[in-house]
Image: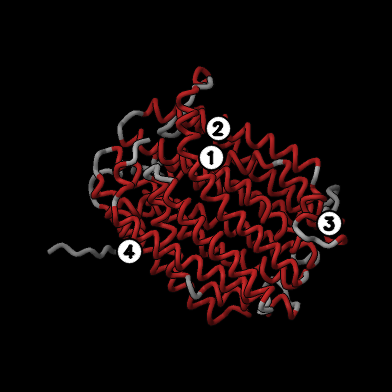
């Protein structure tokens, strides 16, 4: 009987193939190999994103507690931008993956162009609001006057330059759907590598460049992401990817765009529910002052570092589902999800042990203020209690999205976030006076419920019949 184990030499060989993107056929052969080949670049891509988040907060925490809180409040608002970007990117991944599975590369390219057009339209509208009303946005989020005075420049630049966030998300989703996960990975390595270099220069100043403080973090982020978008567009236009776009393709195709909008509405609704609940949770947390808010913000950034690899695996599951459904292999699509979910849950279980044991030591790396450490470590420990559930839930939910069934996760999010998480958080934290820990437990319980409902519904198999 052939062993399932591979040697270190084989692992290194497979790793090289994965990051260079040489293998792009995921509708036949070993499922475990397909999961590995897609997951590795996607995990590295997401790790780069989370490293950027950690480095950003590490530098900004040296400016002031208010600066850290500014990032927390601004990012809770900008997650609404992420909601639109992720919703559209779900549609892009699902449709591009389905067309690639059907061997219709021209149809995949047409979908790619339309999703970029849609992203630009939405980003311009958000930019106008961000540039004109940054102070009002922070005030609406419950920020104190001194925080608004110090941090509104960060909010203005990040929201004003949101087109870089939007296009980075969308074009990487196109590459993932095509199975070109390594291209998406290199785009984020470029983006976040630049950000890590530019962050201290713009925050603290260097030579002729003045110290911009927290505003400098937004400048560095926007330059890094903008450079990566130029790289992505070069790959699309000069044909280094399976998806190729020419000048003649730059026309609005109403039918293709309408199909993208139809599929993405569920995804946008899904993430608007999730992210708007995050905004309300941040608003509740702001009631307990800047130090508690800073601890919460640092904890969330730390958690993103370990959520991102699981998110990478869930993206791999979405691509495998889309391509295998396109190739008329629904059973292979389902088996891919269960295998990926198992790997994700094992990884998240290991991480949860680290957080439960070393939470204070992790938070103190970023800020030594006693209350920041106290509430940041408490947040890490409570939320880590549900990490194994998160690992499975992310994969299964994204599998629905990869099939083009973005409505099911929307309904699940509505029940778990709006009907359970938000009322529970408010009652526990404010009404019953449990404080921030009420919010932390609300997050954990909601994510556990999402995992249970998603797995039960996925087993029913309705996602296999969705047409996109």
Lower position in the chain sequence, tag 3 or tag 1: 3
Q: Nearer the viewer, mark 2 or mark 4?
A: 2
Q: Quadrant of residue 374?
A: bottom right
Residue 258 lies, with reference to residue 367, above or below; the image says: above
Q: Do tag 2 and tag 4 residues touch (Cβ < 8 Å)?
A: no
Lower position in the chain sequence, tag 2 or tag 4: 4
Residue 252 lies, with reference to residue 346, above or below; the image says: above
Q: Nearer the viewer, mark 3 or mark 4?
A: 3
Q: Do tag 3 and tag 4 residues touch (Cβ < 8 Å)?
A: no
For marks 1 and 4, give the CA distance: 35 Å
Residue underneath mark 3: 148
Residue underneath mark 2: 116
Percent x, y for residue 40?
41, 54
Residue 56 lies, with reference to residue 170, above or below; the image says: below
Q: Quadrant of residue 161?
A: top right
Determine crowd level at label 2: few under 14, some 14-19, many 20+ residues with C-alpha closer than 10 A: many
Residue lying at 84% horizontally and 51% vertically, measured from the top left: 207
Q: Nearer the viewer, mark 1 or mark 4?
A: 1
Secondary structure, mark 3, is helix
Secondary structure, mark 4, is helix
Q: Nearer the viewer, mark 2 or mark 3?
A: 3
Lower position in the chain sequence, tag 2 or tag 1: 2
Secondary structure, mark 1, is helix
Residue lying at 57% horizontally and 42% vertically, measured from the top left: 168
Which numbered dot is residue 170?
A: 1
Closer to the camera in the image, 339 or 135: 135
Residue underneath mark 4: 8
Lower position in the chain sequence, tag 1 or tag 4: 4
**Residue lying farthest to the top in this orientation:** 248
């Amino acid at each position: 009987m052939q062993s399932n184990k591979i040697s270190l030499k084989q692992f290194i060989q497979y790793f090289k193939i994965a990051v260079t993107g040489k293998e792009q056929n995921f509708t036949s052969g070993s499922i475990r190999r397909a999961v590995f080949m897609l997951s590795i670049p996607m995990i590295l891509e997401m790790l780069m994103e989370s490293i950027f988040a950690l480095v950003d907060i590490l530098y900004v925490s040296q400016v002031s507690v208010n600066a850290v809180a500014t990032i927390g409040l601004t990012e809770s608002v900008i997650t609404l931008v992420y909601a639109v970007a992720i919703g559209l990117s779900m549609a892009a991944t699902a449709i591009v993956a389905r067309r690639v599975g059907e061997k219709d590369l021209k149809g995949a390219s047409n979908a790619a162009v339309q999703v970029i057009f849609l992203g630009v339209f939405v980003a311009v509208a958000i930019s106008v609001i961000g540039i004109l009303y940054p102070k009002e946005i922070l005030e609406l989020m419950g920020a104190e006057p001194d925080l608004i005075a110090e941090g509104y420049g960060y909010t203005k630049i990040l929201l004003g330059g949101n087109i870089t966030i939007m296009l980075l998300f969308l074009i990487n989703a196109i590459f993932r759907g095509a199975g070109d996960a390594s291209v998406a990975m290199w785009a984020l390595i470029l983006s976040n590598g630049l950000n890590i270099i530019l962050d201290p220069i713009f925050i603290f100043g260097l030579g002729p460049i003045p110290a911009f403080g927290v505003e400098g973090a937004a400048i560095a982020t926007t330059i890094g992401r903008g450079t990566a978008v130029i790289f992505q567009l070069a790959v699309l236009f000069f044909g280094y990817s399976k998806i190729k776009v020419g000048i003649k393709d730059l026309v609005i195709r109403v039918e293709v765009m309408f199909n993208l909008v139809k599929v993405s509405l569920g995804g946008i609704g899904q993430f608007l529910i999730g992210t708007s609940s995050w905004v309300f949770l941040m608003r509740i947390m702001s009631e307990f002052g800047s130090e508690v808010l800073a601890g919460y913000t640092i904890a969330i950034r730390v958690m993103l570092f370990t959520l991102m690899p699981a998110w990478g695996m869930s993206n791999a599951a979405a691509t495998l589902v889309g391509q295998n459904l396109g190739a008329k292999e629904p059973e292979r699509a389902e088996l891919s999800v269960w295998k990926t979910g198992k790997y994700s849950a094992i990884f998240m279980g290991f991480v949860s042990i680290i957080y439960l044991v070393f939470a204070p030591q992790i938070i103190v790396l970023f800020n030594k203020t006693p209350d920041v450490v106290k509430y940041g470590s408490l947040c890490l420990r409570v939320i880590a209690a549900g990490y194994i559930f998160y690992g499975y839930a992310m994969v299964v939910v994204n599998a629905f999205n990869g099939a083009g069934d973005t409505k099911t996760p929307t309904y699940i999010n509505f029940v778990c976030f709006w009907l359970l998480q938000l009322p529970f958080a408010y009652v526990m934290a404010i009404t019953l006076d449990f404080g921030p820990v009420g919010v932390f437990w609300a997050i954990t319980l909601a994510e556990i419920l999402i995992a249970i409902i998603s797995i039960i519904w996925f087993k029913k198999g309705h996602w296999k019949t969705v047409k996109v």
